[in-house]
Every structure is written in C-alpha cells, then in structure tokens.
Image (tube, helix red, strand yellow):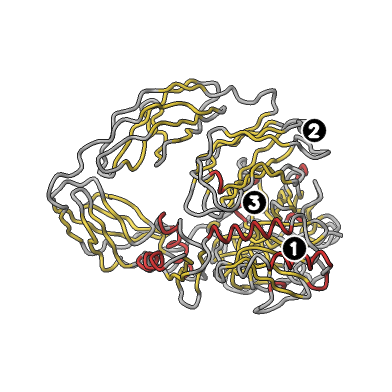
Amino acid sequence: MRSKIIAAACGSVLALGAFTVVPGAAAAVQPDVGSQQQNEAHQRFKGLSQDLRGRLAGHWFDSAAGKLTVAVPDEQAARQARAEGINAVVVRRSAADLEKLLGDVKKLIGDGVPGVYSWGVDVRDNQVDVTVNTTRETEATERFLEKARALGDGVHVSETKSQQRQQAGTVQAGSPWWPGSETYCSVGFAATDANGGKHFLTAGHCTNDANQAAYGQSGQQNRIGTSNVGGSRSVNAREGDMGVVAVTEAGWNLSAAVNTWGQPAITVTGSAEAMVGDRVCHSGNTSKWQCGEVKYTNKAVDYGGGLVIEGLTWTTACSKGGDSGGAWLLGDKAVGLHDGGPSQCVQNPTNDADLSIFQPVNEALRKWNLTLVTGGSDDTAAPSVPGNARSTGTTASSVSLAWDASTDNVGVTGYDVYNGGTLATTVTGTTATVSGLKADNDYTFTIKAKDAAGNASAASAAVTARTQPGTADEEPPTAPDNLRSTGVTASSVSLAWNASADNVGVTGYEVLNGSTVATTVTGTTATVTGLNADTAYTFSIRAVDAAGNQSKQSAEVNARTSSGNTGGRTFTNDTDYPIRDFQVAVSAVRSTATGPAKNPVTVKVEATHTCLEDLNVTLVAPSGRAYALMRTPGGGYSCHPFPAGKTFTVVPGAGETASGTWTLRIGDNGPGDTGVLSSWSLTV
C-alpha cells in the first residue's frame, strides 16, 4: 500500500487540510497571524539592488533580530547591505563556490549512495550539508564519505540513525480524504482551472493511481471527485511531489478558509516562496496545526528505492503519518504541500532526520495552470507615514531620495514617490531616484506607503531639492543598428541589435511592434510574445538614457510567425517565466499527440539570459522521467548569452508516450544574472 497523508469529511462537509469545503459556507474571517517583521523581510529582499543581489551567498530571516540577513563575500558588500536596511554577515564562500561544491557532491552521489538521503546548501552556515543514515552504510558509503570529506571543510557530513519517509500509517479520524479504498491523505489547497473547474492540490504520492475515485469518508463513501485525471496530474519523482484531485461531485464547494484545528481562523490571500528562517505552519489530519522554522530550501531527499526528489523545503515543524499533501502556509500565503517527515512527531528537532519536508506550491500551480482559491482581505488599516524623508544626492537631471520604512498591520509592499502631485516612480525599498528633471530647478517630493490590500498611507513630509546647475543631459543616444530577427515561433519573434552609444549612458531599449511599444529591455535582445500564427510583423528599436532622452528609431525589420503545430505534434508555451538567481523556472505544455514519443524528441527554447554557463535545463516527461538537456559545467568559465532559438534533442526512454504534460525546468545556479524564459516548443 502506498504511503499517504489526508484530511477528512463526512456528509457534505469536507475539511480540505488547510481548507474547509462546505456547501454555501462563507469564508472564515482572516485574522492577522503573520509576522510583520517577517513580511517586511520578504519585501526588503524583493527590493534589493541588483548589484547587491548579484553578490549574495545566501539570505534568510533572522527571527531573533527580526530582520532579513544576507551572506556576502566582503565588508564592502556588508556595508552596502546595511545601508539598504538589512543585516549582513561576511562569509568565506561565494554563491558560486557553494554551487561548485554542491555540484561536486551530486557527481559523487550519482544515482544514489546507500544511507545518503539528503544534500543541499545551508546558507546560514555557508556550507553544503550531507546527511547519512548510519544504519544503512555499506563500503560504498564509506568510499563516498572519504571523497566528500576530501572536498574540504565546505562540505559538512551529519550522521543519524533514522531518516524521513513519505508518511503513512493508520491514524485517528479527523479530516481525511480517501484515495479509493486506500489509507487517507491530507488535502492541500483548493484551486480552479482556466474553465472554472474545481480541484484541490495534494501530494503526488497520494495521487499516483490514474483516474482513482476520491472520497470524503472511509469505506468509499461520500465521493468528492477523481484523482489524477487522465494519468497526467500526479508527479512523485525528481521533479517534485504534487498531484491534483478534480472536485466533480454535486454539493462540494471550494473555500479559502484554512482548517487550523481550533486555532484562530485564516483565509488564504495568495501564494509565496518561503525563505530560510521563515516561520511556517501546516495543517494536516494527524498532527493537526503545527508550526516551525524553515531550515533549508531547494534541498534534495533520497527516500530509497530509486525515489529522489529535488527542490524541497525542510522545516522544524512537527508532522506525522497521515499529514501527506496537507497545506503549508507563510502567514496567510500558501507556500507548500506536505511531502514527508520522520516516523514520529519531534518537537524542536536538532537532527536533520527529524525535519518535515514540503513541496513548494507555486510549482504545482504553474505545472497544471491552476489558480489558487483565495479569500477577500479584511485588511483596511493603512501603513504608517514614511518618516525622515530626505534628499541623498542630486545631478543636473535627477534627485535621489531616502526615507525610513513604514509599518503595517500585515506588511508594506511598496512606496509611491510623487513629484509635486504627479506619481514619479514606485519602489519596494526605501530609496528612489527620480530622473528626467531640468537643471538648476527646485522640485518637491512626497512618499506614500502602500500594502497588499491597496491601503495607502498619508503623504510624508515634503522634501525640496534643487538639481545641479549646468546643462542637463539633453543628448539622445544613437539609434540602434543591425536590427535582425533571430527566431520565430507561432506566437513570438526574437530580435537582436547592436548597442547604441550615449554621452552619459544608455539605460534601456524600447521594442516597437509597428508604432506600439511591445516591451522594454536593458540588453540588446528581446522576444515579443502573444503574436498571431502565420502573421507578418514589423519591428523597430529605440534607445533611452537616464534623462529620458530617446534615440531615433532603428531601421525596421520584418518577421513572420510560424504557422503553428506541425502535423499536430508540436506544442508551445508562450508564457513568460523569470529566470532568477538560484531558482528554477518551470513551464509546462500539454501534448495531445498519440502513440509513442518521437525518437528524438526536439525542444526549442526562446530565452534571454546573460550567462548560459549558469543554467541547467531539464525536460520532464509525463512518465516523470527527467532528461538533462544542458548542465552547468562547474568551475571557472566565461559567461555567454543564451542564444536565440536554442534547440535540444533527446532520445526518450523505452515506453515513453507522446501524450501528457511535458515540463521544462531551467535552473539558474549562479549569482548576478537574470533572464526570462519567453517561449518553448516541444515536438514529440
């Protein structure tokens, strides 16, 4: 019998782990259960300058200090971090050093080493952690440990006598759902599809049987719907541990109210990505409502029997068998689906073997193109007024400003900067530069804070500043030249051009589709998406500098999109997904082609990224098999931009069918570079 976790229901009332599904019931009232300091830490991380972000060796929430803390390679970067209002520690190893060490460890592990069940970066200790169950050691384990320790003190080996498992077992009745006649699992988050269809997310190891009936009561009673419809809505492999149950039976309604088992009610307002140090809580049928701290993100686990899952989050919260698939929350934001944990509920664990593990929920939502069910916010309190507004510098065409952070009952999400009565810019941090001003002129600025519910503070005290005398930058950049099309799909055109020159500096380029600005970029490549198949388009480019001067438009280039599917076996996803440092961009396509997959399968990727050598690219088939298309080389290398229209081929494994969901994963394993996966196509 497969291992699981579940939530319970009787009659027509279904407690969905974190959700209560009650026909006609109103959503629970949302109390303020989140940490204001924790919310602010997330906002400050989003607002970090690109220069500082590119130098980080890690980041986490320090609950003792109540602040975001970052690891940086030198004191200069630490001073810059403190100037941006966050704590900083100077560490020996850069992000690239840690990724190199982790890559070396992964090579030694290969397809698995007896007893070695987890590995990943510990950002707080600035090292790579490897955990070993000594009860399963063999000579192969000893050989691995000898080689791992030879990598230096950057690799830390922990030894235990137990380890996590994907939880199962007979537990007390509470709030389960039943997959067929099997033991129960906890329900995660309610979600809807593009057509309004009702679903809930749970663990993949709870939904591994295709088209299995899902019940709200033991004994195959009170049917809710169907698990893993079509066999394409469950994953329990390297890609992750996540699955979908379709809620199809009459009388079942979805709710964003969280089942907190007697704790204050919570209504889910959205989703988030957890960071190390966050306080998170989970709702499950067995351990009920448990909270703890995130210790690792993006860490792998080897459950044995060939089951390795990557990209999981590890926490100190207690969990038990029967919690599988249940909801993990950061305040009122959905963050994960319960994957596994120890065989017993351990409070305040000091041993990694006693940590609980969850699958990030955003990956599951993206994979199946689902929308989280959320409730309306009861937050009507505005943030406090930004204090100590001041000018920190001027040029002939710009004024730089700073202010003290506002506070809010839930969390500040940003600041609007006004030049007189006109909105000049919006930022997430507590500094801003307003450009495009006239030389030797007085300007008056105010700042308003805002929160996620749209509440805005009163304006700050006015700040008057005078731009520097002399001639402001009124010279436009030169026109971009050599504009060319570098690739097309049925819905996109990729472009490249030669850089413009400017007396001060070019800050960006506007890409025009006819006379309309289609996108703005900082580099010299762009992909325009959302186009019609088999249609001619005309593009041009103009450069912009910091003073707002625009160049003349480049010469035009004509491009025609492709005609779409070829023989019904090419499928495309044109949604943009950001490629961020040390994160994984995940994009899926649904193939309706029949029969076996072609040999080879062809994948064409349209993306922008300044360092091809930082990227790992993987194709995950409907079967769950992962095919490596490109791997980061490791060690020292020179960066090259990701080429337009890069094409990969892969030979599928035996029995690989064309039909189902194919997923492209692009992992960025280096600091200081960002990009966008704008489109990819699969020919099967």
Q: Earlier in the sequence, mark 1 or mark 3?
A: 1
Q: Nearer the viewer, mark 2 or mark 3?
A: 2
- The answer to which of 11 and 170 lies nearer the viewer is 170
| Inter-mark Cα distance, 1 to 3 | 18 Å
Q: What residue type is disc 3 on?
A: Ala
Answer with the quarter of the image where residue 283 lies.
bottom right
Please tell me the numbered disc located at residue 6: 1
Q: Which residue is mark 2?
A: 596
Give x and y (percent) for residue 200: 68, 53
| Inter-mark Cα distance, 1 to 2 | 35 Å
- The answer to which of 637 and 99 lies nearer the viewer is 637
| Inter-mark Cα distance, 2 to 3 | 26 Å
Q: What residue type is disc 2 on?
A: Pro
Give x and y (percent) for residue 488: 54, 27
Give x and y (percent) for residue 63: 50, 75
Q: Are marks 1 and 2 in contact (CB under 8 Å)?
A: no
Q: Which residue is mark 3?
A: 364
Is residue 21 at all visible to an observer of this figure? no
Is residue 389 at all visible to an observer of this figure? yes
The residue depicted at 86 percent of the width and 60 percent of the height is 219
Decide if residue 454 is on the left or right side of residue 617.
left
Q: Are marks 2 and 3 in contact (CB under 8 Å)?
A: no
Element type where label 3 sits in the image? helix
How packed mark 1 is, by other alpha carbons closer than 10 Å (few <14, some 14-19, many 20 or more), is many
Q: Does 25 appear above or below 505?
A: below
Q: What residue type is disc 1 on?
A: Ile
The residue depicted at 40 percent of the width and 60 percent of the height is 451
Q: Which quadrant is the C terminus positioned in?
A: top right
